Amino acid sequence: MNKEVVHFIKKREDEILELWMNEMKNISDERAINIISDQVFYNTSKEFMDLVMSSILDTNEKYYDKIGNFAENVVRIGWPLTFLTKGLRTLSKILYEIITTENDFNHEQANELLIGFDKWLTPIYDEMIETYSATWERTFSLQKIALQELSAPLIPVFEKISIMPLVGTIDTERARLIMENLLTGVVKHRADVVLIDITGVPVVDTMVAHHIIQAADAVRLVGAKCMIVGIRPEIAQTIVNLGIDLDQIITTSTLRKGIEKALGFTNRKMVTVEGDL
């Protein structure tokens, strides 16, 4: 029976695809549809329909390849899992309505058709959920790693001088990453001076200051100087009120002043060049 239904879908694919797309636009969150172009929505919808038919027509290997690729595409464009589960239920409803309308089915035959749909689509439903979840978790893990690496980069700006710009809040996990990247980067870039720029850190409390001081001490232990730059007046006031001791750490109010000092530590300086460029 399933093969007959698949051939029915192929014969009237355009009509069924249009009905499915219209129905999905009506029942889905508008954000899931609006984030992509009409062409991408059409292509993904057609891929969905092909996937359903592939479960019957193709080999297991080809079918699993298709479902894996489809899950990756759906995760990439940002469609939620509920979109897929609703999609299968909607397709089943459309096929059932068309087939029962065009055929003089009695109650028993209609029930048999419905049960047949359920037996056919349930394994696809389960496989799609499992594949989507695995794909999403893998994608999330990769994104998390990438964001962590970007959240505390050590950037060499001059020979022997590197900068770590920090933006956003600093928690225990990020502090650990800062420490690792600093120590690894100092050795990798052969830095003599490291500037930790906290211009983009909105709040410096006791915990944040403690993490930064620990990082600076660790840098000194591997033979490099560490400077904290970007200390705004309100942060300076907070540090004083908290009684945090920064006497052993070189600090400046701006990154420019920090770079000037860093150049001095490496026997260089900034000069102003006059004349046309």
Image (cartoon, grey):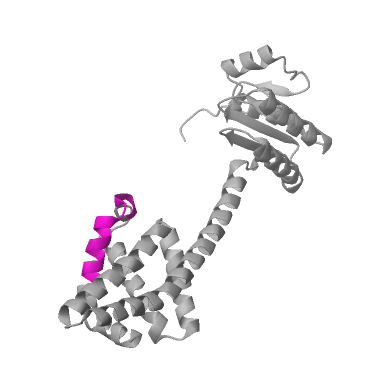
Q: Is residue 69 left or right of residue 193?
A: left
Determine whether 77 is above or below 223 in the image: below
Residue 168 horizontal/vertical position (percent):
56, 33
Give the image quarter of residue 238: top right
Determine whether 3 is above or below 205 in the image: below
**Residue 29 included in the magenta stretch of the image:** yes
**Residue 188 included in the magenta stretch of the image:** no
Determine whether 211 is above or below 71 in the image: above
Main SS class of the magenta portion in the image:
helix
Viewer-proximal residue among 246 and 193: 246
What's the residue at 31%, 81% (across, down)? 112
Give the image quarter of residue 177: top right
What's the residue at 37%, 76% (across, down)? 52
Q: Is residue 267 visible?
A: no
Instruction: Give, as a single range, the part of the protein colored magenta.
Output: 17-32
Q: Is residue 5 visible?
A: yes
What's the residue at 68%, 36% (across, down)? 172
Residue 199 horizontal/vertical position (percent):
57, 27
